[in-house]
Amino acid sequence: MKRLISIYCGKNKFPSLDGRGTPPPNLPPQGGGIYFGFPQQILIIIIFTFSLFTLPANFCQAESGMNLKVEAKYSEAIQLFNRHDGEAARKALKEFQKDYPGSRWKFAVQLRLADLEPAPAEALKMYNEVLTQAGQGEWEKEARWGLASSLFVLGRYKEAWNHLVKMTSENKNPWCAPAIYLSGQCQLALKEYPEAQALFLSLIEKYPKSPWVGRALVGLGDAELGNKNTSASLQAYNRYLREFPKGDMCHMVLHQKARALEQQDMKNESERVIHELVTRYSDSYEARQARNRLSKVIKKFTIQVGAFSQPEYAAKLEKKLRKKGYNAYTLQTKGENGNFYQVRVGSYNSRDFAEKFAGKLEKKEKVPFIIMPYITPPEN
């Protein structure tokens, strides 16, 4: 602004109102000081005052527009990330990183790229880089969490625990509950069962409404099972199944519960739990493990020919097969959406024999089948 009201002579020294670095028209390019009469002085004051308000406003509008564009790009990339569209999210985040390297979202983008990195060792480097650059800023705890998680996956449990301890000192810190949970998992991996038990219990007591409570219950059950306290482990597993009937860890809990029952010599109960696991979560890793274990332990097998949500349909099929001389019976089990009524036929001393008979049954009676471990049906 000062240059607009203190124009002086000299080659290329004029700011010019036309923005080209040349003297405005009607002003001599060289000579002594320029005299402004009263009307010209008024005009310059008006121009100055107008510029004082409009130029900053225009600058702010331009800057605001740029910020909105940057935030829109960032939001677009994060939406892809939240939709678990890994490849598209990675591409969008890298483009953002390239186009806006100094944006306020710089560390957030680095963290999301680290989250998407499939190689734990490479992710570890990326989290460490953010932690080094961000220092004690707003991204520090998130970077430390990623760092600890990567160390845990790499089997470096003590190092992971050292980072997590720094995150659990402030009770109001939103990262405190997950940090306590992962600390407990580190202690479990190190077979320090009492320490793991204490950590999981502290999470459940301090943060009863946290979404991490369910996971802490499972961890507590595992710690008690590792410590040979099967009664306490069953209490923790049953509480999880009661409070989180549709939880994402139900298949793991059923598998561990069956192990605990087996350790208590409650084989029939253990088989029933395994049966529930195999029925409800047939594609899970735990169900495959259970099947392998059952093939070594279970001495008898049966043929399942139908599973119904309505008991009358099961009763009808059972009655039809019984009339034809088959040893059919109905077993009631619990599923995610209520009870199921499974119609089964016979008990066989080997899987091969069961499969051979099932093939004949399917051909003759036109019923599908699946070979299942034999469980003694409840008395009517």
Image (cartoon, grey):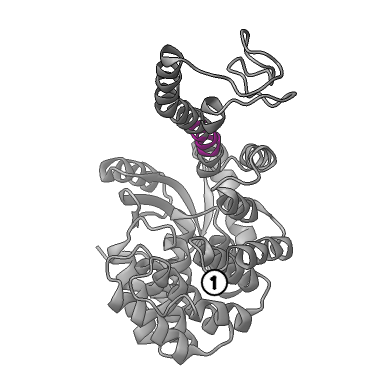
Q: Which residue is mark 1?
A: 298
253 on left or right of 363: left
Q: Main secondary structure of the magenta part?
A: helix
Residue 278, image x and y in percent? 49, 59
Q: Which one is in front, 141 or 289?
A: 141
Residue 76, image x and y in percent? 53, 34
Question: Can you name the residue that lies furthest to the top here?
Answer: 26
Is residue 144 in view?
yes
The residue depicted at 44 percent of the width and 62 percent of the height is 249
Q: Which one is in front, 80 or 235?
A: 80
Residue 380, image x and y in percent? 24, 62
Is residue 332 in view?
no
170 on left or right of 159: left
Q: Which one is in front, 105 or 290?
A: 105
Q: Secondary structure at mark 1?
A: loop
The residue depicted at 43 percent of the width and 29 percent of the height is 52
Q: What range is drawn magenta here?
A: 67-76
Q: Amino acid at mark 1?
A: Ile
Q: Which one is in front, 23 or 316?
A: 23
The residue depicted at 29 percent of the width and 77 percent of the height is 206
Q: Relative to 221, say whether 246 is above or below.
A: above
Mark 1 Cα-neighbour bin, 10 Å: few <14, some 14–19, many ≥20: some
Q: Relative to 85, say whether 18 is above or below.
A: above
Residue 165, image x and y in percent? 49, 81
Q: Relative to 22, say whether 153 is above or below.
A: below
In this rendering, the count of numbered labels is 1
The residue depicted at 40 percent of the width and 17 percent of the height is 42
> Does the magenta portion include 307?
no
Residue 204, quarter of the rendered image: bottom left
